[in-house]
Amino acid sequence: MEEFFQQLTNGLAVGGIYALIALGYTMVYGVLKLINFAHGDLFTLGAYLGFTLLTSFGLSDRVGPLLGVLILALMVMGLVALVGMILERSAYKPLRQSPRLSAVVSALGASIFIQNSIMLVYGPNIQVYPHNIMPDTVIHLFGMPVPLMRILILVASVVLMVALYLFIQKTRTGTAIRAAAIDQGAAALMGINVDRVIMLVFLLGPALGGSAGLMVGLYYGQVNFTMGWVYGLKAFTAAILGGIGNIPGAMLGGLLLGLVEALGAAYISIAWKDAIAFGVLIFILIVRPTGLLGERVADKI
């Protein structure tokens, strides 16, 4: 029972990371019908920016671990959001009226550019996060020990996901995003600045992806410049699993994928965890081709 509980909490923590990255994919697809292949590399950029800020400023030593990590997360999210906005203005906006394939090729080019830029700046070797950021504290839930970092990552993921959902569903700006996702032309006729909505989507998605990159660095203690491809593929899988363009679907898909991976690795074989995860995806898409909660429709983004 203790091993199952450990794998359950580990799967939820990793699934929360997948969900945060998947939200970036699903928001961009919902508004632009575009798969932002550079999103996984923005996630990597967040991990490396977190490493730089930690080693350069030592926030956890100056203001304490929890407050230091919170400030670090806000800084990383802001910087990656800025890069995401620049990416949209330079690589995607000029191609909005072009065939869709042009934007896809531009996204692939942006992915290669960001990945190689990270490699040139930091080198090809794995970068190791400082070990003294958070104390190796273990807390007991239901009488079973769980690492504090795992709980913090899960809580932070849920808070960010709930905040995004409430923002999309309960605010005027969120209503504008949903309107632009339904019909950009009609939204513009109603006075919505569609260009500003698209820019906001490219701020929110990369910010969440950057926070996920920081979580991976803090959780596993090391990062490499190719990690965005693997995590991006898993997050894209999660978005499809839940229903591409569907924000609650991306959250559900990420958590489910994390659980399937963790339990599959523990009870079957760690070498088969990816095969098990993608096997579940294939099965669900055969049974329900639009994903668990359905592809984006008017009332679901």
Image: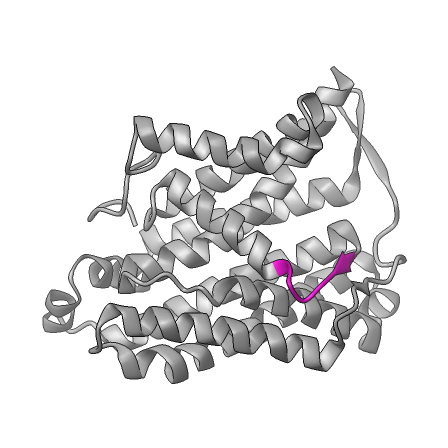
Tell whether 253 sits left or right of 141. left
Q: Position of residue 220 (x, y in %)?
A: 76, 50
State left or right for residue 86 relative to residue 294: right
- Where residue 192 appears, as percent x and y from the top left, is 20, 72
Residue 7 drawn above or below residue 191:
above
Q: Residue 7, image x and y in percent?
A: 70, 28
Q: Is residue 98 placed above or below 174 in the rendered structure?
A: below
Task: Find the magenta span and give its range.
Answer: 222-227
Residue 226 sits inside the magenta stretch: yes
For the residue pair 230 and 187, the one nearer the viewer reads as: 230
Is residue 154 or residue 163 the one in the foreground? 154
Residue plotted at (81% across, 69% down): 59
Q: Position of residue 125 (x, y in %)?
A: 79, 68
| Residue 90 figure quarter | bottom left
User: The N terminus lies in which quarter of the figure?
Assistant: top right
Q: Is residue 100 above or below residue 268?
A: below
Q: Is 197 covered by the magenta stretch?
A: no
Residue at 76% over, 21% down: 3
Closest to the observer, 172 or 301: 301
Residue in the picture at 20% in, 49% down = 298
Decide if residue 47 is on the left or right side of residue 62.
left
Could you tell me which residue is drawn at 45 percent across and 50 percent down? Answer: 236
Location of residue 182 by image quarter? bottom left
How many marks overall? 0
Q: How is the image coloured?
A: one colour
